[in-house]
Image (cartoon, rainbow, N blue to C red):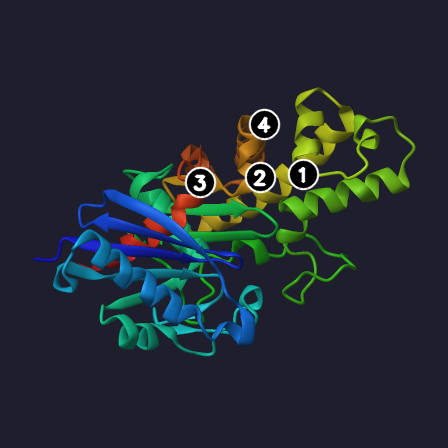
């Protein structure tokens, strides 16, 4: 009888773990520092030792484990092969699922971390109860995941759900981290919003509370907007326009029931959610205007929930 499943979220600084029952209930979560020296040569052994150690601690037989799902910050092919991950010292370029299986003895499935968060939010968060979900995570960059009929869309090259690299603006001279120009990530991420604000402050003499900050952060811009600062309100609206327009295009392809917005920027709350929804409605194909919007609910736990869900959805 398989009663347990592990979910792992492999991040650039922390590896997060979750032990779940096969009904999706989270029993325990814990974390370890991510060791990226020598291109992450210890990552899989660290994960395996943590999993096996938890079974020993809980007196759970290995035969009771359905498997382990792992979310990684990079492209994944066939649920197994991980492309080199920039945020993990170029770790990857091999069949990581096969390698981890050899170490721990459990079936292993691997997926992109934003896709894992999407599955997590569908299973137990802002998209709970829905089968067609678009998830977008706003942090230093913009990530995403698309779920259709309860199944994750990963695509041929592992690029399914890479919403942050939709081109939304022509004429951009600054290169995106992906190497292209004018990507959504350059305008709808925390770093993108701060960049836009700094450009405004350099090019304008308009009075604004934004000038009071020695080191301007994304949350400062939203705080000023909520306080009614005209410049901050414009900057937030421009960000929401870029994201709403991009998501309207996504809806023409995926037609989701709900769009869930997560990541650190989502802490801004309703001012972000309603701003994006406003511009989505202005741009969306009319039948998609009834698409629901929600904020993510699982926070930093979304990745472990989703990684576990990948195993559970295939059980």
Of all residues shown, which one is farthest toward the left? 1
Query: Does the residue at mark 4 contact the one at mark 2 (Cβ under 8 Å)?
Result: no
N-terminal of the pair, mark 3 or mark 4, is: 4
Query: Does the residue at mark 1 contact the one at mark 2 (Cβ under 8 Å)?
Result: yes
> Which residue is disc 4 drawn over?
271
Sort mark 1 into few (<14), some (14-19) or many (20+) by Cα contacts within 10 Å.
many
> Which residue is disc 2 drawn over?
265
Of all residues shown, which one is farthest toward the front? 57
N-terminal of the pair, mark 1 or mark 3, is: 1
Image quadrant in which you'd find residue 294: top left
* Residue found at x 84% / y 31%: 211
* Residue found at x 55% / y 41%: 264
Task: Give the number of the disc on residue 218.
Answer: 1
N-terminal of the pair, mark 1 or mark 2, is: 1
Task: Residue 298: tell me if it is visible.
Answer: yes
Of all residues shown, which one is farthest toward the bottom? 94
In front of the other: 234 or 100: 100
Q: How many marks?
A: 4
Q: Is residue 299 above or below residue 31?
A: above
């Amino acid at each position: 009888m398989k009663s347990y499943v592990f979910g792992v979220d492999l991040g650039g600084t922390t590896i997060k773990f979750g032990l779940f029952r096969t009904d999706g209930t989270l029993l325990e979560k814990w974390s370890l520092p991510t060791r990226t020296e020598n291109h992450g040569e210890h990552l899989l052994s660290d994960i395996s030792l943590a999993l096996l150690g938890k079974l020993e601690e809980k007196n759970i037989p290995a035969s009771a484990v359905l498997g382990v799902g792992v979310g990684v910050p990079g492209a994944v092919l066939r649920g197994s092969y991980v492309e080199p991950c920039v945020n993990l010292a170029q770790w990857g370029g091999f069949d990581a699922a096969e390698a981890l299986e050899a170490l721990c003895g459990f079936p292993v499935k691997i997926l992109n971390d934003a896709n894992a968060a999407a599955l997590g939010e569908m299973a137990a968060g802002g998209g709970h109860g829905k089968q067609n979900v678009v998830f977008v995570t706003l942090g230093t960059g913009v990530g995403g995941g698309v779920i259709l009929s309860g199944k994750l869309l990963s695509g041929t090259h592992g690029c399914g759900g890479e919403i942050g690299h939709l081109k939304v603006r022509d004429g951009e001279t600054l290169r995106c981290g992906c190497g292209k120009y004018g990507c959504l990530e350059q305008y709808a991420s925390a770093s993108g919003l701060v960049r836009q604000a700094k450009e405004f402050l350099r090019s304008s003499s308009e009075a604004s509370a934004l000038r009071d900050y020695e080191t301007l952060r994304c949350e400062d811009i939203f705080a000023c907007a909520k306080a009614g600062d005209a410049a901050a309100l414009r900057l937030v609206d421009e960000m929401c326009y870029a994201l709403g327009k991009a998501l309207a295009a996504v809806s023409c392809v995926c037609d989701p029931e709900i769009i869930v917005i997560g990541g650190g920027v989502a802490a801004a709350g309703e001012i972000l959610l309603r701003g994006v929804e406003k511009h989505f409605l202005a741009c969306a194909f009319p039948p998609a205007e009834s698409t629901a919007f929600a904020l993510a609910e699982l926070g930093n736990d979304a990745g472990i929930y989703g990684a576990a869900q990948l195993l559970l959805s295939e059980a």
